[in-house]
Amino acid sequence: MRTAAVRFYFDADVLGLAHTVCRLRPDCTYPGDPGGVIKGRMRPACLIAEPSTRDSEWIPLVAQQHWIAITRDSKISRRPWETQAVFGHGGRQITISGNEGISTWSQLEIVMRHWRRIEALHERPGPFIYTVTRSRMQELQPRRG
């Protein structure tokens, strides 16, 4: 059996979405993921064992693995520490923003609406952060200064 190459990490704040997507795709993981066989490929257990792992711990780990993190944060542009951590570690992040991504269903709708563009970003080196809503996908520029 071949080992799956993980490319996407779903953060703890979108665990419902993570469980849905990770049942279908061997290249996705989430904190606490025990791993498993998906479509004939063995996905290893996630390096981030606990959903309670702090952002300051998982952001560098995910960046080191060259995974794209998918998370939810309605106020990402107002959290300079988080954006600086992603940019500082060369991370790559997709952030479901706004008030419409509260439920698992709406998160799934938003991510699937933009999935082909998200998947294409795997070839792009970091750092970057994109915010996504139902109607748009926009790159967040790092703050200067």
Image (cartoon, rainbow, N blue to C red):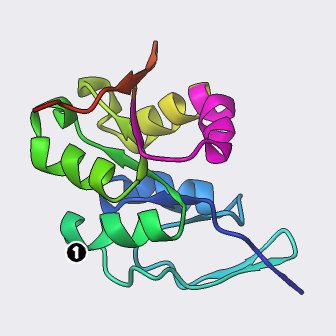
Nearer to the camera, 125 or 26? 125
Q: In this figure, which residue is indicated by the disc labeled 1?
A: 52
Q: Is residue 41 above or below residue 127?
A: below
Residue displayed at 42% across by 56% down: 16
Residue 66, image x and y in percent?
54, 62
Q: Give x and y (percent) for residue 100.
A: 31, 25
**Going by the image, does 1 lie left or right of 85?**
right
What's the residue at 24%, 75% (across, down)?
53
Q: Secondary structure at mark 1?
A: loop
Say if the magenta span includes residue 121: yes
Residue 31 sits in quarter: bottom left
Residue placed farthest to the top in the image?
A: 135
Could you tell me how many numbered marks the image carries? 1
What residue occupies the far front of the structure in this picture? 145
Q: Which residues are magenta?
A: 114-130
Quarter where residue 22 is shown? bottom right
Residue lying at 63% horizontally and 84% vertically, measured from the top left? 44
**Residue 51 lies in quadrant:** bottom left
Residue at the spot x=32%, y=70% of the render? 58
Q: Position of residue 86 (x, y in %)?
A: 30, 52
Badge 1 density bin: few <14, some 14–19, many ≥20, Cα 10 Å = few
- Residue 61 placement, left or right of 111: left
The answer to whether residue 122 is magenta is: yes
The residue type indicated by label 1 comes to Ser
- Report whether 49 appears left or right of 45: left
- Height in image: 116 above or below 83? above
Where, quadrant-wise, is the N terminus in this rendering? bottom right
**Rendered-image quadrant of the C terminus:** top left
Residue 106 placed where, x, y %?
Answer: 43, 32
Residue 92, placed above or below residue 75: below
